[in-house]
Amino acid sequence: MPETEMPGSKISSDELQIIRHRYYFASQFVRQKDVLEVGCGPGFGLGALRREAKRVVGGDITQESLRRAQQYYRERVDFVSLDAHNLPLETIVS
């Protein structure tokens, strides 16, 4: 079984497929845009987002999750350590 965002916490193949489907759905809305994924975890969806987006930044508060995501996406995605409850942004535009 694959692991979730928390190392050692398992997820079923069906649950993983649902997550992947959501990212592929979301990827159609990020074409040629800059994307910040807050709470990227180990990076399940970063590849799908990166295929369409101009630039992707993955952010997470957990250093272990960032390290795991960087193992797979270091060359295609930028990473930042951040707290979703205290984002360093003045304005959020969707």
Image (cartoon, rainbow, N blue to C red):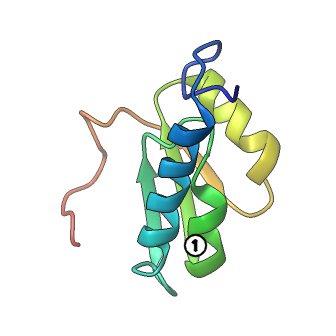
Determine whether 91 is above or below 2 in the image: below
**Count of marks placed on residues:** 1
| As drawn, 46 above or below 65 | below
The quarter of the picture where residue 87 lies is top left
| Identity of the residue furthest to the bottom in this view | 32
Q: Residue at x 42, y 69 (%)?
A: 26
Relative vertical location of residue 85 with respect to residue 21 in this rendering, above or below: above
Q: In this figure, which residue is indicated by the disc labeled 1? A: 55
Q: Nearer the viewer, residue 6 or 61?
A: 6
Give the side of residue 71 with respect to residue 11, left or right.
right
Quadrant for the N terminus, please: top right
Q: Position of residue 71 (x, y in %)?
A: 81, 40
Q: Residues within 10 Å of mark 1 (few under 14, many from 20)?
A: some
Residue 31 spot, x, y in % from top left: 49, 85
Q: Is residue 74 left or right of residue 66?
A: right
Name which residue type carries label 1. Arg
Using the rendered view, name the quadrant where residue 64 is placed: top right
Outermost residue, front direction? 14
Question: Residue 34 location in percent, x, y?
Answer: 47, 74
Q: Position of residue 85 (x, y in %)?
A: 24, 33
Taking the spot 25% from the left edge, 35% from the top edge, the residue there is 86
Q: Nearer the viewer, residue 17 or 33?
A: 17
Residue located 61% across and 45% down the image? 43
Left or right of 7 in this view: 61: left
Q: Secondary structure at mark 1?
A: strand
Q: Nearer the viewer, residue 63 or 30?
A: 30
Residue drawn at x 79%, y 47% is: 72
